Image: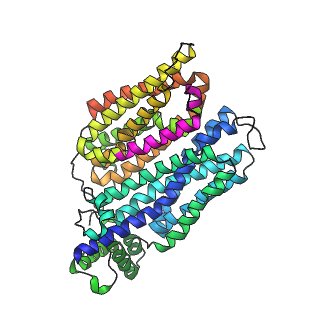
Amino acid sequence: MCLKFESKGVLHQVLATCTINIVNYAHGAALGWVSPFLPLLQSEDSPLESGPVTVEQGSWIGSILCLGGLFGAIVYGYLTEKIGVKKSIASLCISNMSFWTIVYFGTSVYHLYLARFLAGATGGGVIVTFPLFIADISDSKFVNYSTKFSIVTNFFNFHRVRGALGSILALAGNSGILTMYIVGDLLSYRTVPVVMISLPTLFAILMTLIPETPQSLLKQRNVAQAEQSLKFYSGLKSDQECTPEFKQQFEKLRNFILNSKLQSDRLQLQDFTSPAAKKGILIGIFLMFLNQFCGVFAILTYAVSIFSESGSTLSPGTSAIIMGAIQIVGTIASFIFIDLAGRKVLLLISTYGTGLGLTCLGVYSWMRSQSVDLTGLDWIPIASLSLTVFLFCVGLCNIPFFVLPELLPAKICNAGNTISMISITIFSFISLKILPILLEQIQLHGAVAIFASTCFIGGIVIALFIPETKGKNLVSPENV
């Protein structure tokens, strides 16, 4: 009987996680929107009444998303404390709907600035609220499963439930980007937002079926509702099905939340001055720098423009679609190999591999600018960028976010994550802002040379200074 309940609980956790990721999928589409439509906005056929977008304006369209992300992280971080995690996530549909609405009705570049800022706010909210929701509803232990739910359990048999649910976050976002590459290549500028606004609408409807997390309800002193919520996420339908273990788990959680034990353990300045804390924070900031200044996120954002510059014989739209598919394959590979090969090994492979792929693209682009005969070699741009994106997703894309909690002392882990989030927002804004300008001033090969050099130097730093954290036990006060 107990095995059956645990399986139902996992099923409910998976369904809830998939539901919240509908808006993350829509946000991924909003991220990818720049790639197919910025070239159109910059052309004489621009749909804006204000006319074609300049290179400077295009760089703002790409980069202002990061400022919105910082704003969204602050706002939704506040909302989680005031109205709860589930309600905060449900409210993400407002900013995402606003993005698609403004894109449809917008007539000037300033409207697009606002739209992209709101898209960034959605992303900031996703980063803040989703990990909290998943941590609150998911089993942190290994679970034995009944065969009744084999479709679900085949995936979870070799993973912690919490980690597996967290992996859906990256897959949903990347799938949204790929969808926009495809939709943007097939549909018109005004049709796309009409189609895509259906996603946040569906999300808003389905979120009414998902209970608030037990932790949020307990913080609001709704003890009875919190117990019902925990029953739902544990797969229990009635009081008769509640085992002594369940009652013990709920009482432990209830006492922990209501007694507010964490409030007495306040952060102090000396918590950040220990050698472990300083090293962890510096490594975290460095990895966020490398994550952005390897250039892959910027390249994905401006994918169609990059392929137009590269000289590939495939259409820019088709090339972007291929690269988006490769991104998803790389993300899946990352979660397969991260605990097999180790964090540091994958980081080194990913960083040097990303640098090598960018170097191949840069050399091809430079030879093309020198009018070298490259007959028969027009497959190099798509091949080199596909390799670059795959190797980036295998390690450098995700591992910095795994490594940081494993490096920082438990007491400052949340504060360290906040510092890293702010730093990656700043680095992302800079990289997105400068790439269109670099493409105009020093061409593709010059921009790629900067990114590739960053990768090779970063690989040396990883080899010398970053420890392996595979298998490190995390002790955090929220494990109740």
Q: Residue at x 77, y 39 (%)?
A: 51
Depth check: give the residue in front, 160 or 82.
160
Residue 207's x, y, as percent?
50, 69
- In the picture as drawn, the residue positioned furthest to the bottom comes out as 240
- In the picture as drawn, the residue positioned furthest to the front comes out as 376
Residue 46's x, y, as percent?
73, 40
Q: Quadrant of residue 201?
A: bottom right
Q: Quadrant of residue 200?
A: bottom right
> Is the magenta region chiefly helix, strand or loop?
helix
- Asked if 392 appears above or below 454 in the picture, the reply is below
Q: How is the image coloured?
A: rainbow
Residue 117's x, y, as percent?
60, 49
Q: Is residue 320 magenta-colored? A: yes
- Which stretch appears magenta? 306-332
- Asked if 450 appears above or below 336 in the picture, the reply is above
Depth check: give the residue in front, 412 or 300.
300
Residue 195's x, y, as percent?
63, 56
Q: Residue at x 38, y 49 (%)?
A: 417
Q: Quadrant of the N terminus?
A: bottom left
